[in-house]
Amino acid sequence: MAEVVVVYHSGYGHTQRMAQAVAEGAGAELLVIDADGQLPEGGWDTLLAADAIIMGSPTYMGNVSWQFKRFADASSRIWQNQAWKDKLFAGFTNSAAMDGDKLSTLNYLFTLAMQHGGIWVSLGVLPSNSKAAQRNDANYLGAYSGAMAQTPSDAGAGEMLPGDLETARNFGKRVAGVAGKFQR
């Protein structure tokens, strides 16, 4: 079975809830980037041992949080040795607005993965974009490059929509499935 790790930062708990759903779908270990942008002890070793790394950050001002950026900058030590080359990567994000420039965040995560020589796994779920679609349907936001969720700015993490969390779980399951195919 492939080893999948979800590494994420969450400012208000929404991205954490999404990370938990992704990890549930993937059967993955969670690594939290703390409020200072640091991994827990042994975190870098965990990422080195992973077959797939799923990265998550809230979208703040059109990009990843500064804490996630600090983690990404610190990964340059790994980049120098290309130690993550040929690993699978994927990404997810949440913001308050329906668009909220979430694609900019996913593009940042994609670029980071490409700099490390990684292989990107897309969402792999068709969007819910028919007239009958409801906001609570899976992939209602119409993402392709990673999982996206939207939570109003005055809503707590416990108020996230089940459809967004289902999208996250399915995304985790997809990444784990692709990682399993790469192990054969």
Image (tube, grey):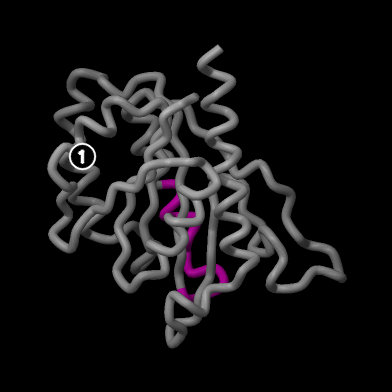
The 10 Å Cα crowd at callout 1, few under 14, some 14 to 19, many 20 or more, is some
Q: Position of residue 38 (x, y in %)?
A: 15, 51
Q: Position of residue 107 (x, y in %)?
A: 44, 47
Q: Which residues are magenta?
A: 96-107
- Residue beneath label 1, please? 43
- Which residue sits at x=26%, y=27%? 48
Q: Is residue 129 above or below residue 91?
A: below
Q: Who is closer to the viewer here, 4 or 139?
A: 4
Residue farthest to the top, as pictured = 184
Can residue 109 be seen? Answer: no
Q: Is residue 132 above or below residue 105?
A: below
Query: Quadrant of residue 156 in the image?
Result: bottom left
Residue 84 falls left or right of residue 1: left
Question: For residue 120: magenta?
Answer: no
Q: How many marks?
A: 1
Q: Amino acid at mark 1?
A: Gly
SS type, badge 1: helix
Can residue 15 be seen? Answer: yes
Q: Position of residue 127 (x, y in %)?
A: 72, 55
